Amino acid sequence: MAETLTIPPHLTGNLALFFDLDGTLAEIKPHPDQVLLPPDVLLMLTLLSDRHRGAVALISGRSMDELDALANPWRFPLAGVHGAERRDINGQRHAVTLQASLVREVQTTLQRAMASLPGSEVENKGMAFALHYRQAPQHEAAIRKLAQGIVERFPQLALQPGKCVIELKPKGINKGEAIAAFMQEPPFSGRRPLFVGDDLTDESGFAVVNRLGGVSVKVGEGETQAQYRVANVRAVHEWLKALTDDSGKEEAR
């Protein structure tokens, strides 16, 4: 059972810090376009990045373009679309792609099927698809059935349930693999990883961080592999402030 935190555990030494965005650093909104990263949170992330030699990354189901827009004007190392695309500290991009013909066929199939489910939405991420039903929770069962049928028809894809969304992504891609890849590269290698996330999509990240002897933090309720838990996004912001203050004290010693 995850231990509930009000302040960060005492962390010493060099850290590699990984953060989910929606539901972790930013409040979830009715539509993804309404989400904002508060300026003070961005400032805390940049302070942590400076103090840990750039070893701070955002790990999200969003695309990297969306992440850059939300983090503007700063550019962090990123893993977008659950790790299907990734940008390292040097700006080099790594991406998993799907055949254009497959993307077109899946897009057409999803659009036709979800047209009969008012309030639902298909988001084409290029190498993945998000089936949103936050505005139409009554269609959850139908969307799950639709997504299951797609992965049976196209074995290159895998299901990834989330909060009011089901994603179809390339098989073998997850946030844990993205964190593991970062941990093989400077400035993350040789450091103790910390990952904060809120969703089922973050559990693979918690598993990797736990295996590497790091610190895993779950935001909100629900079963989890994470070692620690904080109540909500506001608590993450308070936790980040305390972590930033602690890092400053550690640096001053």
Image (cartoon, rainbow, N blue to C red):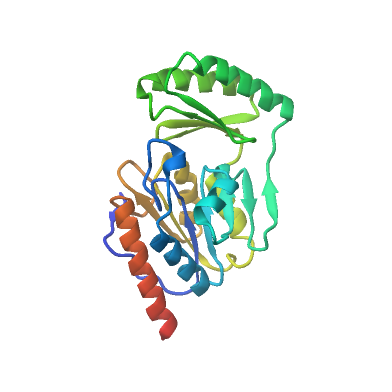
Estimate the x, y position of residue 197 in percent, counting from the top left: 42, 50
Nearest the eye: 157 or 165: 165
Q: Give residue 65's position: percent from left, percent from top.
A: 59, 47
Give the vertical position of 225 relative to 42 (above or below).
Answer: above
The C terminus lies in quadrant: bottom left
Residue at (42, 74) in percent of width and height = 12
Q: Residue 108 appears in which quarter of the rendering?
A: top right
**Residue extending furthest toward the bottom:** 253
Residue 241 is left or right of residue 95, and the answer is left
Q: Is residue 2 left or right of residue 157?
A: left
Q: Which residue is depicted at the point 69% across and 50% down? A: 94
* Residue 49: x %, y % from top left: 51, 68
Instruction: Say above or below: 22 vs 149.
Output: below
Residue at 41% x, 74% y is: 247
Q: Which x, y percent locates residue 59?
A: 52, 51
237 to the left or right of 42: left
In the rendered image, the vertical position of residue 201 relative to residue 247, given as above or below: above
72 or 111, which is in the foreground?
Answer: 72
Q: Nearer the viewer, residue 65 or 192?
A: 65
